[in-house]
Image (cartoon, rainbow, N blue to C red):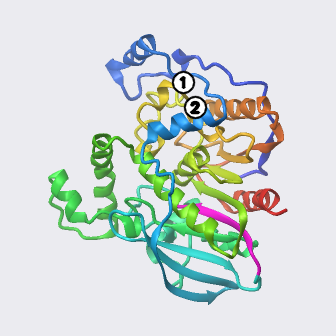
Amino acid sequence: MCMHGDACGPGTGAPQLDWSSSIGPEQLGIFGDWVAEARRQHRLYPVASPGPATRRRVAELLGFIDETGLPSEVKVETTWEADGLLGEEISWSVGYGPRTRAFVLRPADHSGPLPGVLALHDHSGFKYLGKEKIADGPEGPLASVLALRNECYGGRAFVNALAREGFVVLAHDTFAWGSRRFPRETMERQLLLDRDADDVAGYNVTAALFEHVLEKNCALMGTTFAGVLAHEDRIALSYLSSRPDVSGRRVGTIGLSGGGSRAALMAATAKHLSATVVVGMMSTYPSLLNRHVETHSWMFFPPGLARFADWPDVAASRAPTPLLVQYDRDDALFPQDGMEAAHERIAGHYRRAGAAEAYLGQFYDGPHKFDLEMQESAFAWLQTQLTP
């Protein structure tokens, strides 16, 4: 059972992990000593301090850094009102592939500008849909997302709940998900697969294998899977910020799991972001080696990042801009020592930036999730950061 979230204060500094204790024989087997050789040949995970230099280096590593980042051919597809919310389905072009579809939700009883929040859907190995995993459109919840919501989101569309708290919330499909997904026949042709089943589960299995092909293509184009996702998320942020019903630059972002990974990348690459919430997606890289690699997406492992930074440095690179990270103590995707070390590293960054209070790390009991208790805490924190 999830206990009351512990609001953990800033730590005393970033601990140095003992690599020998972090690395076991679980995944690499007889090549377990390969990691030690890599460490001998070059320094890994040096501390990258917050600031423009780190953010610039992250952006250069990711690739696909368009300074404009604006959508084109924006169109309102449909509007509706339900359960106290006004909803819009928007579409736009990012310049390649099919049009992006997005939901925008806001309270129906408020006419003036409100703070904006960009809600980022998870990975979850579920690429057939994107925004519908976290937001209800005019048709209500789709049957195919109910199991995921019950397991990870306390059984509700958190985007709709967040909008009712007084925000304009945008949830969009990103590259390779939902309206931006690849046709199944395209993936199967390259993977040399021939599947008869034409269902959502079958699509998701194929898409998981195809992500490796996407990363290879990204490498040939001088970018990364994480970089393309961050590019499209910045376009969505630009659109949200430009809306007349959004209050100036009071805009934040939030996401669980793969959405949390995308939120961290936004903190490092977006120009105008007032607050970031990363849920269930924080650990140091050394703690994952040989233990927790296979469960993660390429979006969490931008090639080359380990040579100049660790993942917590990416999330903290915008310090002193407010950052909330929520950790699940029993998260099977991360070792507890890795989550604790990440918390200490981020807290140290914020303390040295003279803004210890701008970072909040909350630890919850239970597995990988963003349940109702965590949601309510995150919503309240966003209210504090985005409401004057």
How many neighbours does mark 2 have within 10 angstroms: few (below 14), some (14-19), or many (20 or more)? many
Residue 239 vs residue 3, the one in the foreground: 239
Majority secondary structure in the magenta region:
strand
Q: How far is disc 2 from disc 1 in space, using C-alphas?
A: 9 Å
Q: In this view, does 386 lie above or below 269?
A: below
The outermost residue toward the front is 68
Q: Which of marks 2 and 1 is in front?
A: 1
Amino acid type at mark 2? Thr
Q: Where is residue 338 in the image (x, y as percent from the top left)?
A: 60, 31
Q: Quickly name the residue at label 1.
A: 45
Q: Do the residues labelled 2 and 1 touch (CB within 8 Å)?
A: yes
Asked if residue 1 shows in the view, the reply is no
Amino acid type at mark 1? Tyr
Q: Position of residue 267 (x, y in %)?
A: 61, 47
| Residue span colored magenta | 112-121
User: Would you say 201 lies left or right of 7 here?
Assistant: left
Q: In this view, does 250 lie above or below 58?
A: below
User: Would you say 386 lies left or right of 144 here?
Assistant: right
How many neighbours does mark 1 have within 10 angstroms: few (below 14), some (14-19), or many (20 or more)? some
Residue at 65% of width from left, 54% of height from top?
272
Residue at 77% of width from left, 79% of height from top?
112
Q: SS at mark 2?
A: loop
Specify the label residue 284 is tagged with: 2
Residue at 75% of width from left, 41% of height from top?
320
Asked if the stretch drawn in magenta spans residue 61, the answer is no
Asked if the stretch drawn in magenta spans residue 115, the answer is yes
